């Protein structure tokens, strides 16, 4: 069986060819769309593995010709453009699988084997038009894993559970799934279960009949009914009282709801996306969260990494928010490289939300058009000293919070905790001494070489704090 590989990077083509040959395939390689179409017209291939950016065009945009020549041939797309947009465009072609570069070569070979084994008649799932201008920014490996999960739930109604610390973009992911998915013409209804008093949750979710309780002066449609035909986003699901969890589970199992004080069961057609910043497993063990509800919601988990674990994304996010701030009427700024690097070194315990708020603040405060590191260093110090009221002002609280959020692996707790503690401590000392390492070492009471070594290991650049 022959696989057609369209790849203009000769090095990558070689590696892929070797891996596919090891799987027992024959491989035909070409490096352009013109050549691809010529080969497809003259020969039958078991599968197509294609890059996106080719010298004579875009491998996804021109996929129509491939489909015309070989309607059932599985297509596997490789791409260096690691955006959600490419991932979505790839999945809209009905491609069998999408691999952002760099990818695991063995996994690719396995996927090709699987695709060839599965090749079946495809339905009409390709008729959706991709949506441009996606809201999620960031190309880190961690975000690509998120994008891949998103593309897997766009053509179905599986329940999605979005996990991640507060401010990591859970709601944005839910909105993206709705906007890009097959329910985009239906409503997107968000309900924050933590913000509703326990006794009103049922009425909020399921509605009530007139006179159902004191104050129910008129019939009220609940969020389930409002979301009919669309998506219901259940935010902060970990804060839902047990009673309401039971009612919710019943609604999900039956696909029907009953208004509070009502008799009839009403069928509703909603896709459920739930989110929480809590770790539900210990809550299940402690009897605070229903295990059966967890399994019902957690069909497809999407985990958003904290921002500090994808520092690569920080400069792009910062520039994105500067642009947003300008579009909302704040002065337009550009961000210098040193300032971007300094931002990327901050812990951002409030994640993307904290970064966003900080960028709006500096949009307002910095007078120069171009934002340089020295202009923001004092503002960062201020933000570190104030703010974050909810995270506990004491070190006890901070440690408890850190442990709960991080779950360091057994045997690594001490080392990881010390590293996490050193970063803000060293940054504070360097800020205090305007980036002077000798004085910072004296202030800390440690050896200057030890400080320098640790700064390197922690990727902290003291030069950025100099004035
Ligand atoms: N990847 C991202 N790209 C652009 N904006 C983001 C991204 N992630 C989060 N945001 C923005 O950060 C803020 C917090 O995101 P949100 O989805 O409300 O977080 P969560 O629900 O996890 O607390 C929002 O303003 C959101 O638009
Ligand atoms: Mg949220």
Image (cartoon, grey):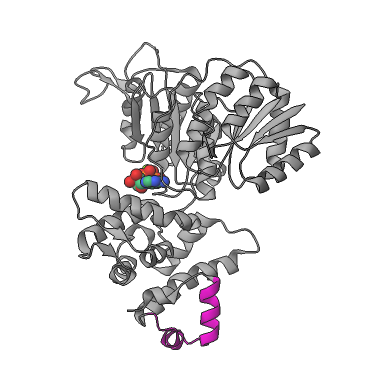
Residue located 56% across and 56% down the image: 407
Height in image: 208 above or below 467?
above
Image quadrant for the C terminus? bottom left
x, y percent for residue 99: 59, 39
User: What is the count of numbered marks?
Assistant: 0
x, y percent for residue 452: 52, 80
Residue located 32% across and 53% down the image: 356
Q: Quadrant of residue 80?
A: top right
Query: Image check: 123 left or right of 373?
Result: right
Considering every residue shown, the one lying at the far top of the view is 264
Ligand 1 shows up in the quarter that is top left
Q: Is residue 297 magenta?
A: no
Q: Is residue 456 magenta?
A: yes
Tell which of 86 and 454 is nearer to you: 86
Residue 236 is at least partly visible in this image? no
Q: Which residues are magenta?
A: 435-457
């Amino acid at each position: 069986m022959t696989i057609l590989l369209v790849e203009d990077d000769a090095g990558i083509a070689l590696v892929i060819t070797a891996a596919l040959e090891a799987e027992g395939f024959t491989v035909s390689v070409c490096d352009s769309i013109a050549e691809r179409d010529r080969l497809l017209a003259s020969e039958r291939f078991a599968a197509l593995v294609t890059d996106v950016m080719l010298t004579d065009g875009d491998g996804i945009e021109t996929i129509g010709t491939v489909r015309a020549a070989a309607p059932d041939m599985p297509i596997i797309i490789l791409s260096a453009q690691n955006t959600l947009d490419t991932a979505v465009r790839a999945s809209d072609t009905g491609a069998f699988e999408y691999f952002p570069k760099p990818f695991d070569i063995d996994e690719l070979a396995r996927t090709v084997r699987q695709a060839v084994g599965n090749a079946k008649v495809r339905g009409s799932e390709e008729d959706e038009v991709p949506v441009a201008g996606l809201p999620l920014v960031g190309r880190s490996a961690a975000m690509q894993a998120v994008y891949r999960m998103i593309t897997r739930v766009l053509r179905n109604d599986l329940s999605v559970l979005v996990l991640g610390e507060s401010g990591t973009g859970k709601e944005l992911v839910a909105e993206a799934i709705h906007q890009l998915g097959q329910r985009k013409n239906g409503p997107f209804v968000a309900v924050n279960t933590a913000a509703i008093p326990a006794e009103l949750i049922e009425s909020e979710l399921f509605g009530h009949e007139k006179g159902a309780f004191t104050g129910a002066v008129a019939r009220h449609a609940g969020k389930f009914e409002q979301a009919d035909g669309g998506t219901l986003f259940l935010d902060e699901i970990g804060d839902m009282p047990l009673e309401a969890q039971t009612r919710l589970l019943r609604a999900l199992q039956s696909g029907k709801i009953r208004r509070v004080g009502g008799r009839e069961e009403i069928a509703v057609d909603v896709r459920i996306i739930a989110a929480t910043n809590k770790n539900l497993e210990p809550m299940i063990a402690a009897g605070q969260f229903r295990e059966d509800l967890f399994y019902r919601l957690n069909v497809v988990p999407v985990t958003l990494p904290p921002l500090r674990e994808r520092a690569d994304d920080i400069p792009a996010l910062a520039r994105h928010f500067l642009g947003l701030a300008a579009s909302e009427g704040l002065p337009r700024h550009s961000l210098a490289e040193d300032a971007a690097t300094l931002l990327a070194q901050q812990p951002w315990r409030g994640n993307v939300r904290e970064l966003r708020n900080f960028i709006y603040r500096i949009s307002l405060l910095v007078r120069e058009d171009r934002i340089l590191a020295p202009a923001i260093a004092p503002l960062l110090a201020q933000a570190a000293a104030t703010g974050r009221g909810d995270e506990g002002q004491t070190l006890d609280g901070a440690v408890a919070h850190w442990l709960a959020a991080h779950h360091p692996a057994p045997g690594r707790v001490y080392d990881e905790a010390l590293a996490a503690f050193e970063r803000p401590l060293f940054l504070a000392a360097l800020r205090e001494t305007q980036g002077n390492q000798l004085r910072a070492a004296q202030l800390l009471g440690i050896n200057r070489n030890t400080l320098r070594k640790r700064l390197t290991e922690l990727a902290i650049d003291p030069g950025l704090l100099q004035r």
